[in-house]
Image: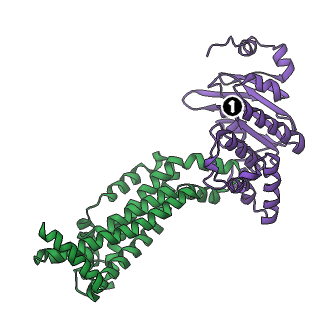
Chain colours: A purple, B green
Amino acid sequence: MIGIRKKYEHEVLRVDSLAIKKGEIYGIIGPSGAGKSTLLRIINLLTPPDSGSILFHGKPVSYNGAARLAIQRKMSLVFQKTLLFRDSVRNNVAYGLRARGLALPEIEKRVNALLEQVGMTDLAARRADTLSGGEAQRVAIARAVAFEPELLLLDEPTANLDPGNIEMIEDMVIKMNNLRSITVVMVTHNIFQAHRIAKEVIFIHQGDIIEMGETEKIFSAPAEEKTRAYIEGRMVY
Amino acid sequence: MSSLFEGVIEAFRLIVSLDPDLLHIVFLSLSISGAAIIIGTLLGVPLGAYLGLKSEKKTRLINKLIFTLMGTPPVVAGLIIYLLFSRMGPLGVLGLLYTPWVMIIAQVSLAAPIIAGLTMVGVRSIGNEVVENARSLGAGPALATWTVIRESRIAILGAVITGFGRIIAEVGAVMIVGGNIAGKTRVMTTAIVLETRKGNFELAIGLGLILLMLSFIVNSFLYNIQRGGKNN
C-alpha cells in the first residue's frame, strides 16, 4: 500500500507505505477508532481509499469490477460481527467454493476435509444460526479459508469469546498459516493474543501506523513512546 | 345477531351443497388474486431488492413514491385503470374492461408496491452486511444479490402475505374495472357488496365467512413456507 488516505467525516487513515510479506501472521493493534478495521477493508477492496494505491504481487490493483473480483478472490475477510448465511454449516463453508464454480465432488472433498480439520464434522448438517458464538466463528473462519486464499484478513475474530474458543481459533489460524501458507492479517484489541500468534505487529494510532516490526521486538523494546504506552496499558483513549 | 348466526349456517349450506355459482365465484377470486400476487411478486421483489441494495440517498424520491403507492385507495387505483382501459382511454382498444384480465391488472397495481416496499425495507436492513460478506468470499455482483434475496426470504414472504391480504380483501378496484358481472367478473368481495345491498345479509355473511376461511387457508400455506424459511 502506498500513500493511502481515507476520510469519512474526518481523515481516519494515513498509510504512507505498508508491505505485507507472504506467509507471515500480522497482528494489527491499537485503540478503538484507530483505523484498524478501515485498513482491513481497504486491503480487501471493500472500501476504496480516497487516494493512494494498492499493489498485489507488485501490480497495482484496479477497482474495475472484473479486475477487483479477481483480486478479491485471492483473499478473504472475516468480519468482527459474524454473519453466517441462513443455511447449513456445510453450505456456509462451501459458499466461496461455489462462487468460484468448482465441481461438486471437489467442493464436497474440500468441505469435508476442512470440517474435520476444525472439528465440526458432526455439525455439518446443522443450521448455522443455531450455533454458539465460538462454533459460528470457527465456521466463519473455515468458510473464509475453504478456497485457500493467499491472504486471510481477520477483524477481531475472538472478540466476546470464552478462553476455550479463543484458544481453538488461535490454533486454527496458526494451523492455516503453517499448513496452507496463508498470510494472515489480524486486527485484535487483545495485545496478549497479538503477542501469542503474530510474527509481526503493526501498531496504529489515530489513523497513523506508529510502529511496525517483529512481535518480540515491539513488545520488549518498542521504539515509540505511544507504542510503549499502549502495550503497558497506560494509553487512555 | 340472528343474521350473523344465520350467516354461519348459510356459509355451511353453501359449502356443503357445492353451489356451482359459489364455486365459480371462489374459483374466480382465487384465480384473479393468485395471478395478481404472482405477477406482483415477479415485479415487486426484483424492484424492492434493487432499491434495497442502492444507497438510500440515491433512491429517496422513488422510495417515497413506492410508500405512497402502498397506501393507494383501491377505488383510486380502480378509477385510474378504468380510465386507461375504457373505450376512450389510451388502452381502450384492447377491450379488456369488464374482464378478469383488467381485474388482475388492478390487483397487481395494488400488490406490487406493497411487495416492492416491504422487500426494499427487508433487504435494506441486512443488504450491505450480506453483500460485503458475500463479496469477501468471492461472490460476483449477481451471486451477492441472489444471496441477499435468499437471506431476506422471510421478509419477502411477509411482503407477499401482506400483498395477498390486501388484494383478496379489496373490493373497490375490482368493482370499478370488473363491473361485478355474474358468471364473468363477480368475485367474493363484489358478491358480498351486492348481497348486502339486496338485503340478503345471511348470504353476504356466509360469503364473508367463506372469504375469511379461504384467506386463512392461503395465508396459513404462505406462513408455513415462511416458517420453513426460518428453519432452512
Identify the image quadrant of residue A98. Answer: bottom right
- Measuring from the top left, give residue A141's x and y in whole percent: 74, 44
Residue B158 x, y percent position in the rendering: 44, 58
The residue at the point 78 percent across, 51 percent down is: A115
- Helix, strand or loop at disc 1? loop
Q: Amino acid at mark 1?
A: Asp
Q: Residue at x 17, y 69 (%)?
A: B4
Residue for badge 1? A162
Residue B116, horizontal then vertical, whole percent = 43, 59
In which quadrant will I find the N terminus of chain A? top right
Tell me the subunit letter for badge 1: A
Q: Of B29 and A7, which appears nearest the observer?
A: B29
Q: Position of residue A6 (x, y in %)?
A: 64, 32
Quadrant of the image occupied by residue B223: bottom left
Q: Quarter of the image containing the C terminus of chain A? A: top right
Asked if residue A175 can be seen in this view, the reply is: yes
